Amino acid sequence: MVATAGEAERLYTLNVSGVEIQIVMSGVGAVAAALATQAALSASSYDLAISAGIGGAFEGSGLAVGSVALASEIVQADLGAWDGDAFLPLAELGLEVTAGNTGRFACWPASLSLGLPCGPFVTVNSVTGSVAGAAELLRRVPGALVEGMEGAGVAHAALLAGVPVAEVRGISNFVGPRDRAAWRIGEALTGLDTGLRRVLERLAES
């Protein structure tokens, strides 16, 4: 599951022995990703749903632009309520996105070592554009590695369908003040290709 044509284009030639791959372009955002994932999972049988694309790395994560990371869990980080200046996540509100789940989705293969940086990814509806915004996300999700916009939507649909989920993102920039000129999309897409191959090769072995 990829959000944009630019991300999808490089993946159409992805070929891993023993794995049948379907690339689906969802559009941007968790809602679009959830709907596209649900449609795909309803139409056929799959062993794994992967949210793939580029994303921003948090400062201090150890990730470099052009590298790639794998999610250990996907956190729907801006779903909740504001109480004055305090953000309250669903868990503190006693609410769930589905039975037993408050917007934190465990990922495959969190327990396996693929030689990739692995940690929490956050899904947001709006790309973070300030140092304070990045710090707030890290307060909500300590140790978060990467920010993206679709992972939680893919994960939610996959959970309802009973299909494992993974999220892989090549790093195009750092989370914080928006500096579009500093983004390295080509390098991020190369990293994404490397990461996806590693995930799919492990899937073929399992």
Image (tube, rainbow, N blue to C red):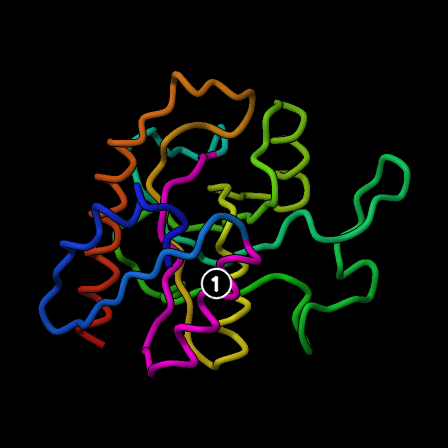
For residue 11, above or below residue 183: below
For this view, does 177 lie left or right of residue 89? left
**Magenta segment:** 30-57
For this view, does 24 lie left or right of residue 38? left
The residue sitting at 37% across, 46% down in the picture is 4
Q: Examine the structure image and report whether residue 131 is included in the region drawn in magenta.
A: no
Name the image quarter holding residue 22: bottom left
The quarter of the rendered structure image containing the C terminus is bottom left
For residue 70, above or below residue 175: below
The residue sitting at 55% across, 55% down in the picture is 30
Q: Examine the structure image and report whether residue 32 is included in the region drawn in magenta.
A: yes
The quarter of the rendered structure image containing the N terminus is bottom left
Q: Amino acid at mark 1?
A: Val
Name the image quarter holding residue 114: bottom left
Which residue is the site of mark 1?
Answer: 154
The residue sitting at 48% across, 48% down in the picture is 28
Who is closer to the viewer here, 101 or 3? 3
Name the image quarter holding residue 129: top right
The residue sitting at 21% across, 39% down in the picture is 190
For this view, does 65 lie left or right of residue 140? left
**Residue 63, image x, y percentages:** 37, 34
For residue 68, above or below residue 76: above
Who is closer to the viewer here, 164 or 12? 12
**Residue 56, image x, y percentages:** 45, 35
For this view, does 196 lie left or right of residue 59? left
Count up the numbered dots: 1
